[in-house]
Amino acid sequence: MPRVNKGTPSFGRRMGKTVHIRCRRCGRRAYNVAKKRCAACGYGETTQIRHFSWQNKKLTGIRLR
């Protein structure tokens, strides 16, 4: 009977599932489809741009459609 692992051998089966799509506010591919929030700018959770003092984030405002 073969052993079933949850680690590295199983990650190939996870391909094809879309986790992040392009965010409509910041343009980065960081919008989580399941959580409905952007990991980069916080869109969907807050009206303020997600920002911390230790970050060096350039907000150009350019989005790709």
Image (tube, helix red, strand yellow):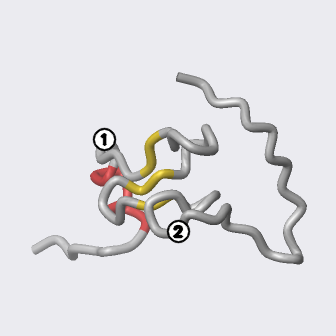
Q: Position of residue 16 (x, y in %)?
A: 30, 41
Q: In front of the other: label 1 or label 2?
A: 2
**Residue designated by label 2:** 46
Q: Position of residue 10 (x, y in %)?
A: 32, 62
Within-10-Å neighbours for mark 2: few <14, some 14–19, many 20+: few
Which amino acid is tagged 2?
Thr
Which amino acid is tagged 1?
Gly
Within-10-Å neighbours for mark 1: few <14, some 14–19, many 20+: few
Q: Residue at x 67, y 67 (%)?
A: 50
Q: Residue at x 64, y 30 (%)?
A: 63
Q: Quadrant of the N terminus?
A: bottom left
Above-or-below relation of 61 to 6: above
Along the line of sight, the residue nearer the viewer: 19 or 32 = 32
**Residue designated by label 1:** 16
Above-or-below relation of 36 to 4: above
Q: CA distance from mark 1 to mark 2?
A: 29 Å
Q: Secondary structure at mark 1?
A: loop
Q: Position of residue 54 (x, y in %)?
A: 88, 76
Residue placed furthest toward the front:
47
